[in-house]
Image (cartoon, rainbow, N blue to C red):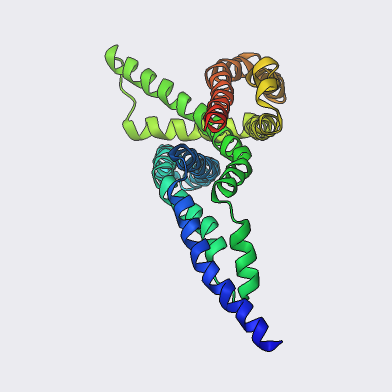
């Protein structure tokens, strides 16, 4: 009986080697578009997470800096670091996106290597390798990543982009002042003004940023759970709904100061939310079509 069991183990070991070779061949034959989509999804998720963290850092740095400058009168009119933090956040997002494909390759390698790792249980290893299907595993991994690969970059963009857009307008205003030969605001004072605008935005419409971030995750979930046909024929409410809710939310307490703040939110949201939500849906549909074709 013991000899028969050992013979079975020897046969299984020999078969395992051939199964490992088959697995390697299947991994090498994986369609390139699967690897490419996986790399992009991991990169987007990583960049989106960094953008969300960057938005929190910008708010914290600006708030702490402004309070510090107000307390230390000798530093009044100096930058609190909010603008620098905003620019640094975008730089960090770019770096994260660039590193994403490398992280994706490592993640994919680990996922596929699970099937060929020896556990010491010959028959268990043999059964696992018999059932291994690298392409099916990669497709399952891609499906698991779909939601966050839409939600994180969308949420990160819609909370970081508005202040970035305001920075552009702030810079244009500064340039226009110089062009009209008006007395120039000292550059450090100009930066400090924008830092204070960041804090003011946080106080008056910080809740709006939180709401649109939540709506981004909600929209991404609806996209992920919807079929491709449904998303084409009857897509879930996206940018227009988020814009309407954001403007309404800005009425409290911003509307108490007049209509200027809701108008700023509406203008900024139209430039940020509408294209961002539309692009998120288009990206998901494009990737699904590639996966269906392959």
User: Splitting the image into 4 quarters, where does residue 241 fall?
Assistant: top right
Answer whether residue 53 is visible to the viewer in this image.
Answer: yes
Residue lying at 50% horizontally and 54% vertically, measured from the top left: 107
Image coords of residue 255 (percent x, y)? 69, 19
Residue 36 picture quarter: top left
Identify the residue at image location x=53%, y=64%: 116
102 vs 238: above or below: below
Task: Where is residue 202? Give x, y as percent.
Answer: 59, 34
Residue 210 screen position, x and y as percent? 65, 35
Q: Residue at x 59, y 25 (%)?
A: 281
251 left or right of 36? Answer: right
Residue 252, image x and y in percent? 72, 25
Outermost residue on the bottom side: it is: 2
Q: Quadrant of residue 205?
A: top right
Which of 22 and 249 lies nearest the eye of the viewer?
Answer: 22
| Depth order, front residue of 175/117 | 117
Name the residue rendered at 68%, 88% in the picture. 2
Q: Is residue 103 visible?
A: no
202, 214: nearer the viewer: 214
Q: Is residue 129 left or right of residue 95?
A: right
**Camera-side residue of 109 and 136:** 136
Q: Quadrant of the N terminus?
A: bottom right
Total numbered labels placed on residues in the image: 0
């Amino acid at each position: 009986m013991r000899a028969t069991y050992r013979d079975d183990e020897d046969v299984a070991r020999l078969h395992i080697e051939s199964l490992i070779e088959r697995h390697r061949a299947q991994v090498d034959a994986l369609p390139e578009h699967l690897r490419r989509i996986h790399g992009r999804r991991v990169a987007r998720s990583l960049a989106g997470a960094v953008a969300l963290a960057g938005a929190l850092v910008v708010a914290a740095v600006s708030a702490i800096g402004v309070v510090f400058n107000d307390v230390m009168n000798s530093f009044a009119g100096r930058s609190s670091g909010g603008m620098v933090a905003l620019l640094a956040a975008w730089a960090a997002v770019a770096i994260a996106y660039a590193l994403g494909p490398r992280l994706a390759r490592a993640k994919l390698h680990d996922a596929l290597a699970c099937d060929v790792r020896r556990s010491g249980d010959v028959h268990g290893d043999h059964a696992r390798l018999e059932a291994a299907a690298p392409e099916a595993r990669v497709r399952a991994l891609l499906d698991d990543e779909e939601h966050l690969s839409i939600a994180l970059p969308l949420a990160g963009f819609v909370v970081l982009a508005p202040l970035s857009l305001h920075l552009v307008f702030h810079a244009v205003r500064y340039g226009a002042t110089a062009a009209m030969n008006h007395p120039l605001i000292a550059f450090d004072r100009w930066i400090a003004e924008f830092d204070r605008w960041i804090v003011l935005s946080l106080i008056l419409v910080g809740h709006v940023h939180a709401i649109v971030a939540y709506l981004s995750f909600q929209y991404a979930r609806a996209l992920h759970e919807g079929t491709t046909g449904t998303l084409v024929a009857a897509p879930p409410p996206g940018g227009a709904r988020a814009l309407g809710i954001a403007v309404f939310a800005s009425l409290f307490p911003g509307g108490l100061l007049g209509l200027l703040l809701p108008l700023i939110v509406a203008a900024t949201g139209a430039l940020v939310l509408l294209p961002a939500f539309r692009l998120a849906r288009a990206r998901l549909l494009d990737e699904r079509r590639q996966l269906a074709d392959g």
